[in-house]
Image (cartoon, rainbow, N blue to C red):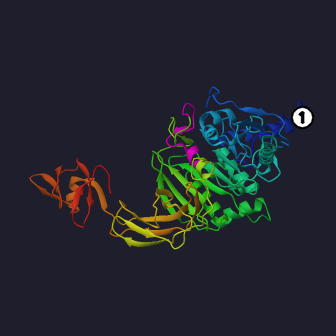
Amino acid sequence: MPSSNPAPRRSSPRTTAPPGRRRRIMGRLAAAIILATGVALLSPAPEAQAAVPLERVSNFGANPGSLNMYVYRPSSLPANAPVVVALHGCTQSAQIYADNSGLTTFADRHGFLLVFAETTFANNVSQCFNWFQNTDIRRGQGEAASIRQMVSHAVSSYGADAGDVHVTGLSAGGAMTTVMLAAYPEVFKAGAVVAGLPYDCTKDTGALTCMNPGVDRTPAVWAQRVRDAGPGYSGPWPRVSVWHGDNDTKVVPKNADELRDQWTQLHGLDQSPDRSSVIGPNGTRRTEYLAGDGTVAVEVNRVPNIAHGTPVDPGSGAEQCGQTGTANFIDSICSSYWITRFFGLDRSAPQPGRLPAPAGLRATGVTDTSVSLDWEPVDGAADYAVYLDGTRVATPADSRFTDSGLGVGTTHAYSVAAREPTGAEGARSAQIAVATTGAAPACWTANNYQQVQAGRATTSGGYAYAKGSQQNMGLNNTFVTHTLKESPAGYYVLADGGCP
C-alpha cells in the first residue's frame, strides 16, 4: 500500500508541466485515489430521501479541514444543552447519518444538540474522514481542528454546555472519533466508536492492514500514541464505548480489542472486565471496565451476527431507533439508545441525588441460586437501589436484600445506592463480586451414537436413552443429534431448547 495518503484537497492548477513531471503528478494522483478507494470502509449507498431537517452552518470559524457543518436542534432544546458530535462513514453524508442512525430520536427525547460534521469528495474520493492522514489527526490541524471549531461554534451560538460534549461515529467516522478523543481530551467527556479503530493505528503500518487483519500492539504502546497527541496532558481521559459486529470483515473485531487496550491503559485499568452482561433484543455481549469511583470508564459491546455498520432496531419502542433502508445500517440493536445512556444524556434515568454511597456492602448468605446482601443504613434514605451487573433489580426499603433465581455457579457484581424521597439516587457503593454455590450444568451436543460412546446415554432395542433420566433420544445412529445437560453429575436430561 502506498504510504502517502488520500486525494489532495484542491485540484492541481491548470498549467502545462513537462512530460516527466506530468507522469509523476499522475502517478501520485493515481496512488492517492487507489489508497482513498481502498480505505473506503463502507459499501456505496444511494442518498436516502431526507427525513431529518438539518441546518447548514456555513461560517463556523476556522476550517483547515474543509469540512461541512450541520446541526440538528430539537424544538425543545434547553439552555446549556449537551452536545453530541456525529461523524458519518465512508460513502455517506451528514444527512444519511442523521436519517438512519437514530441519534435524532434521542436528541428529541432528552434535549441535546447534534452536530453532524461532513467530509467531501474533494477531501477524500470515498468521502471518508482521513483518520489515517497525519495532517488531519493532530491537534490544531486539518479535519480534527475543523471539528473542534464546530464544537466551539455550537457552544457560542447555540448556548450549549462546553462541559458536556461527546462524540460518536461509524467506521471512518468511528476512527475519527478516537482522533478527537486523543487530540482534544479536555473537550470531550466521552466517545462511542462504532466499527472503528484505535488512534494512530497507521503510525507504523498501512490503513488496510489496520482494518484487516488488524494489528496487535501492547496497551502501553497504544496509550502512548494518545499521550503523544497532546504532550503534557495528564487527564482526566474521556470515557469510551466501543461497538463492533462479530462478523465484520472490513474492520475486523480485533480492533475492538485494541481499542479496549488503548483506553483502559489510559485510565490506569487492566484489560480484565469488572463485569459482563447481555443487553438488547439480540444478545449483545457487554464488558465493562470500572474506574475507582464505580463509573464505567470503558465498555465493549460485541454485536452478534452483524457485519460492518451501525446497529439499529427500527420501531417506536423505548429502546428502538433507526432505519435500515440504506446500506450499513443493520437491524439488530439500537446502538444509539445505549450510547446516549453511556453519555449520561438519558433524562428518564434517575438523576443524581445528594446522598452518600452506602458503606459496608457485603454478602451475608449464598446458595446455589440466591445471594443475600446487607449494608449500613444511610441517614435520609427513603429506600435503596440494588444493582446487579449494572442493572437496577430492586428498591428495598431496608438495608438488606436477597436476590434469587440466579444460575448455579455464576458470579455477579452488586452495588447499591441510597434514594431520596423524590427517587433521586445518591452515589453508588463500591461493587462486590459474589458467586453462587454449586457447579454450572455441563452440556454436550452430539449425535446419538457419539452420546452413547461417551457414556452419556445407553442403548436398548436400537434406541438411545439419556443416562439417568432415561429419556428416549430416538434411534441410536449418527443422523439424530441432541443436546444433553448433566446435573447432577452422572444424570443427563434432554436440553435441545437451551442449555444450561
Residue 87 covered by magenta stretch: no
Q: Which residue is mark 1?
A: 17
Q: Position of residue 450 (x, y in %)?
A: 23, 57
Note whether 407 is above or below 3 in the view shown: below
Residue flagged by tag 1: what amino acid is it? Answer: Ala
Q: Position of residue 38 (x, y in %)?
A: 66, 42
Image side of residue 349 versus residue 116, left or right: left
Note whether 238 is above or below 117 in the view shown: below
Image side of residue 65 versus residue 315, left or right: right
What's the magenta region? Answer: 323-339
Is there any visible trace of residue 194 in the rendered image?
no
Residue 326 covered by magenta stretch: yes
For the image, the number of numbered tags is 1
Please state which of residues 497 and 36 is positioned toward the viewer in this rendering. Answer: 497
Q: Report the residue at 68% width, 52% height from top.
A: 178
Q: Position of residue 48 (x, y in %)?
A: 62, 28
Q: Report the residue at 17% width, 62% height from top.
A: 468
Q: Report the residue at 25% width, 66% height from top.
A: 488
Q: Quick one: SS at disc 1? A: loop
Q: For label 1, count other residues whose C-alpha is less than 10 Å away and answer few (under 14), some (14-19) or many (20+).
A: few
Please state which of residues 334 and 264 is positioned toward the viewer in this rendering. Answer: 334
Tell me the quarter of the image containing the C terminus.
bottom left
Please state which of residues 246 and 98 is positioned toward the viewer in this rendering. Answer: 98
Q: Position of residue 429 (x, y in %)?
A: 55, 67
From this viewpoint, which residue is outermost toward the top? 49
